[in-house]
Image (spheres, rainbow, N blue to C red):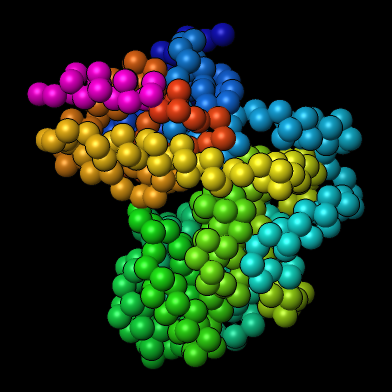
Amino acid sequence: MSGPGDIARRAAQAVAGFTSTRSKGPDAMFGGPDGPTHLVRAQAARIETADGQWLLDWTMALGAVALGYAHPRVQEAAARAVRDGAVGPLPHVLEVEVAERLCAVYPGAEQARFLKTGAEAVQAAVRIARVATRRERVVHAGYHGWLDGPTVGAGVPRGTERRWTAVPFDDIPALEAAVAGAEPPAAIVLEPVIERAPAMAWLEAARRLASESGAVLVFDEIKTAFRLAAGGAAQRYGVHPDLAVLGKALANGFPLAAVVGRADLMARVRETWISSTLATEFVALAAARAVLDVWSETDVAGHLARAGGLMRDALDGWAEPRPWTVCGVPEMWFLRFGDDARERRFLLDCARRGVLLKRGAYNFPSLAHDRPEVEETVRVIREALLEATP
């Protein structure tokens, strides 16, 4: 096996931008080089790095894992699907079963359509909304993947951003003004949780404005479904969208995303083109069925809330002065530092001491995190905080 320095050097030479998942690169994780760059395995709540160090991980693959890495039920289901061939010329029967079960757990969902990534799923939902409304503009709040539209910048055609109107999270007047623009929207696309729980009035306003304007209300539940609840924010808060996009923890790290929603809207897929060769490979579908089984038998949401609550309580209770503000909800928490250099020293020292936290983004408890993992993390944070103090 290559050493950690060698693999980082080779990555810099062979992989454009160092890694294909930008949010996993050293700059995104730690704010610069020097931290661990690659892993060789992941198990429960821990990863083994290229240099053989085991780290207690709170990033959970950017939220893609809620049951813990290599969960036995999920791994066994995926392994059986691999032995059965993984993919074929016809859709596997699992596509039907998983679609039925998603519709049973997500409020208001009557049909599902599968893809591989959250970005694709958002674009599919928007295309469905555009076909249904014969409109083009989208009003949105949050991050919805890297594809043209919600993302602007180099390489994105000029004018694309005019079809996407961004509004601040939880800002009802801004949402009302955006929806009332000269061109009525095809869709209102919202991440229901962004750094804090939403005000009920915000979600209710989105539902009302979509209904009044004839727009399709889409919840981007890539992070929140199978985390806040199996049915995500719609289940927790009781406000139901017309369409929703699911992903990440849906298959506990296997690549699967879905658009779910009302049958009359979902039927519009026949009027446009939404198709992907590997949308129906059945390893990820088998993993998703296993995830659904675990959720039906175990209070996963309750466990995530408890584990995250323990961690948040410990951080919130830290004696003043402390260098961070604790943000997010228990199932998706993060530390906001006022000093970037101190944050970087802190995160690197946590990693050296055996705990992996992410810079400026959510940390996610999993079914593999419990009180011992919280206590271990608190001990490491205490030591790292003293180390990071100027």
Q: Choose between 315 and 101: the one closer to the eye.
A: 315
Percent x, y of residue 64:
55, 42
Picture layout, residue 386 above or below residue 79:
above
Q: Choose between 375 and 365: the one closer to the eye.
A: 375
- The answer, for residue 277, to whether it is visible in the render is no
Percent x, y of residue 149:
46, 66
Picture layout, residue 246 above or below residue 266:
above
Give the magenta-colored segment's residue range: 375-390
User: Which residue is drawn at the image coordinates 41% and 28% (left, top)?
Assistant: 374
User: Which residue is drawn at the image coordinates 78% and 30% (left, top)?
Assistant: 76
- The answer, for residue 214, to whether it is visible in the render is yes
Percent x, y of residue 194:
38, 57
Q: Choose between 134 and 18: the one closer to the eye.
A: 134
Picture layout, residue 140 above or below residue 79:
below
Q: Is residue 225 magenta?
A: no
Percent x, y of residue 48:
51, 17
